[in-house]
Amino acid sequence: MQHTKEERSSMKASDIMNRHVYKVKEGDTVRAVIEKFIDHRISGLPIVNDRNEIVGYISDGDIMRYIGKKSDRIVGNFYYTMVISDPECMEERVSQILDLNALVIAKRKVVVASWDEDIDQIAAILGKKQIKKLPIVRSGVLVGIISRGDVIRHVFRSVTN
């Protein structure tokens, strides 16, 4: 059954969000985050407090930026970036961050959407902000998550069925 344009535009985040959200608590370490990444084959997690309110978001990119730190140098009138490529330095940086609180590395300003947001608005947010996943909240509490793939699959099915 093919949905009309009006039906597609009236679909809400709650219609397609994944209600089972992998997350970590605000006291969890980077080690706990990486373990969840590996165990669940994911690349990002919301960080929540005891009331299940989002206090941060950590992605594999945040961890990569932290362990792949660069050294910026100025020589004469030239400015260049030297990437540290010594594997021992990399392993040392990784081992140093494992016991850090995940919030040290995480983004604190998290883009979220409301559970009753229209799907086309969800797609616009994901595209404009260039993010892969969008936590969904209701009354400030995490209730789901939507990925770019979720939106694409849903729209494709609604157009082709």
Image (cartoon, grey):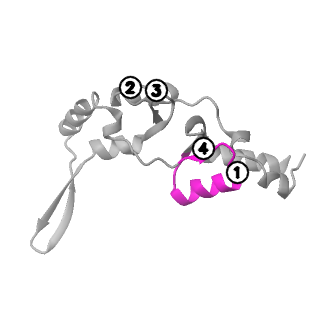
Instruction: In the rendered view, tell whether residue 106 sits above or below residue 78.
Output: above
Q: Position of residue 11 (x, y in %)?
A: 77, 48
Q: Amino acid at mark 3?
A: Asp
Q: Are marks 1 and 4 in contact (CB under 8 Å)?
A: no
Q: Secondary structure at mark 1?
A: helix
Q: Secondary structure at mark 2?
A: helix
Foreground label between 2 and 3: 3
Query: Is residue 36 shown left or right of residue 86?
Result: right
Q: Are marks 2 and 1 in contact (CB under 8 Å)?
A: no
Query: Is residue 70 shown left or right of residue 102?
Result: left
Task: Work out how far the residue at label 3 is from the one at label 4, CA to CA, in angstroms.
Answer: 24 Å
Q: Amino acid at mark 2?
A: Ala
Among the two numbered marks 3 and 4 on one chain, the one whose residue lies closer to the N terminus: 3
Task: Work out how far the residue at label 1 is from the one at label 4, CA to CA, in angstroms.
Answer: 12 Å
Q: Secondary structure at mark 3?
A: loop
Q: Position of residue 15 (x, y in %)?
A: 74, 40
- Single out the residue that lies furthest toward the right: 1
Which quadrant of the figure contains the N terminus? Answer: top right
